[in-house]
Image: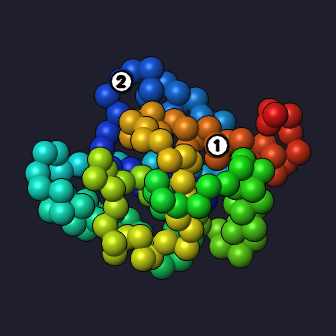
Amino acid sequence: MIKIICVGNIKEKYLKEAIEEYSKRIKKYTQLEIIEVKDEGLVEESKAILLEGVKISKYLSPKDYLITLEIDGKEMTSVELSKKINQIQIENSNITFVIGGSYGLSEEIKQQAKLHLSFSKLTFPHQLFRVMLLEQIYRCYKIINNESYHK
C-alpha cells in the first residue's frame, strides 16, 4: 500500500484531474490513499511547522516505511526509485510519503523517515508536486513490472 500525506489541498481543476488519473493508474498495482491535512496559512514559520507536524503524525504508523520529500534529501533516478520501492515492499507492505507545507517538515517527522527523498534542488508548488510524485510512483510500478512507459 502507498499512502501519501500532504499539507494543503488542491483547488485547481486540472491538477485534481491529473491526480485522479494517476491515482487510477496506480491502483492497478497497489492500494493508494491520499490524506490531506490543513495547512496553517500565514502564521510564524516555526509554529506552522510544529502544528502541521502534529497533524501529519496522526496518520503515521510504526509499520509504515516513511519517506519524506525534502529539498536536501537524496536524489534518485526513476530506475533507482523503482528498485527502492520494490525492495521496500518485499520487507514492508506500507510505504508512506510525506509532502510538507510551504515551510517544510518538522524535525520530528524528518527523524522518523527511513528515506529523505528529493526530486530536485528546485522549489515546486505543493499542488503540482503531488502530481509529480504520483507520476513517479506510477512510473516505478511500470518499471518494476517491465511494462512499456518508462524511457
The image shows residue 52 at horizontal and vertical percentages of 25, 59
Residue sitting at x 45%, y 20%? 14
Kind of residue sitting beneath label 1: Gln
- Camera-side residue of 69 and 28: 69
**Residue 125 appears at what percent x and percent y?**
39, 36
**Left/right of residue 107 with respect to residue 124 in the rendered view:** left
Residue 45 shows in the view: yes
Residue 97 lies left or right of residue 25; in this view the side is left
Q: In the picture, which quadrant includes the C terminus?
A: top right
Compare residues 106 and 65 and report the one nearer the observer: 106
Give the farthest residue toward the front.
121
Mark 1 Cα-neighbour bin, 10 Å: few <14, some 14–19, many ≥20: many
Residue drawn at point x = 44 percent, y = 76 percent: 112
In this figure, which residue is indicated by the disc labeled 1? 136
Q: Do the residues bearing badges 1 and 2 touch, measured as CB atoms within 8 Å? A: no
State whether residue 20 is above or below residue 7.
Answer: above
In this picture, residue 114 sits left or right of residue 106: right
Q: Nearer the viewer, mark 1 or mark 2?
A: 1
Q: Is residue 97 visible?
A: no
What residue is drawn where x is 86% and y is 39%? 147
Q: Nearer the viewer, residue 122 or 4?
A: 122
Q: Quadrant of the N terminus?
A: bottom right
- Residue at 60 percent across and 34 percent down: it is 22
Q: Residue furthest left?
A: 43
Q: Is residue 64 above or below residue 122?
A: below
Looking at the rendered structure, which numbered label has been put on residue 9? Answer: none
